[in-house]
Amino acid sequence: MFNLILFGPPGSGKGTQSEKLVEKYQLIHLSTGNLLREEISNRTPLGVEAKSFMDKGQLVPDEVVVGIIDSCLEHHKDAADFLFDGFPRTAAQADALDKLLNLKKTEISLVLALDVTEEELIKRLLNRGKTSGRSDDTNETVIHQRFAVYKNETAPIAEHYKKLRRFQTVKGEGTIDEIFNLICQAIDKRMKTLPSDLW
Ligand code: AP5
Ligand code: MG
């Protein structure tokens, strides 16, 4: 089994690279941001609750997102390989993910963090905000709030994966294909070190 976390601040390219990675490596893509936006567009009670946090650039409560991931893992019971995008984002989520994977007798194989300067991130998000309809992309105050949440709550969980020697940083600036190649190199290298019956 091969389980990848694509890590990095808002706008670093997690979603863009995930689309290419799921195709190449046949991974199941679990993006909590996308799943929450789906709940919002279906106007479910969970979506209504989540929207109030997302519009302000705050994190949706841990139990809500962990519940979503839990049911996705359950739904894909027989699937082998997962790509987590935008999850985990807090120490409690990282802990819950370890436990959920443990129940499946697996673990995180690799965490790849996309490194992009804040200036470039703001440019990308405001640019996408012009067409995406994502309310959290149009307001610069909300964008800064998302960065602050990332720094305070998400970035620190890198330590957990560093201790396990599963964490690696990848240059997140350049063309989408250049970055994709760097990510693939890191994945291929890691896959070679795993016993073949595990992925
Ligand atoms: P989420 O949807 O996860 O958003 P995010 O992490 O804030 O970041 P983005 O999805 O905006 O960026 P990305 O890294 O995927 O970059 P992308 O490829 O899109 O979360 C949204 C909200 O949901 C959160 O604020 C929170 O409220 C809630 N939430 C989600 N998960 C949660 C969790 N686990 N716990 C609690 N709450 C949660 O690229 C960005 C733009 O840049 C695009 O326009 C793209 O075309 C462009 N781009 C990409 N690569 C390049 C490149 N190489 N050069 C130039 N442009 C590029
Ligand atoms: Mg995304």
Image: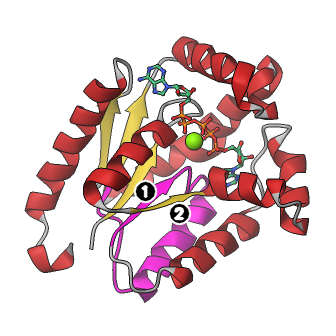
Answer whether residue 141 is visible to the viewer in this image. Answer: yes
Q: Position of residue 55 (x, y in %)?
A: 85, 39
Please state if 183 lies on the left or on the right of 41 as rendered: left
Say the numbered circle drawn on residue 94. 2
Q: Which residue corresponds to mark 1? A: 160
Q: What residue sits 27% from the left and 74% below the top?
A: 1
Residue 48 vertical placement versus 136 (above, below):
below
Residue 182 image offset from top left, x and y in percent: 23, 34
Which residue is nearer to you in this view: 160 or 34?
34
Q: Position of residue 41 (x, y in %)?
A: 81, 54
What mark, if any, has residue 147 been given in the picture? none
- Tell me where residue 36 sits by quadrant: bottom right
Whether residue 143 is situated above or below residue 196 in the rendered picture? above
**Residue situated in front as seen by the camera: 131 or 199:** 131
Instruction: State whether label 1 is within 8 Å of ligand 1.
Output: no
Measuring 70% from the left and 30% from the top, which residue is drawn there? 132
Q: Where does the magenta region start and end?
A: 81-110
Residue depicted at x 36% and y 62%: 27
Q: Residues within 10 Å of mark 1 (few under 14, many from 20)?
A: some
Residue drawn at the location 71% of the way across and 24% of the way down: 131
**Disc nearer the start of the sequence (2/1):** 2
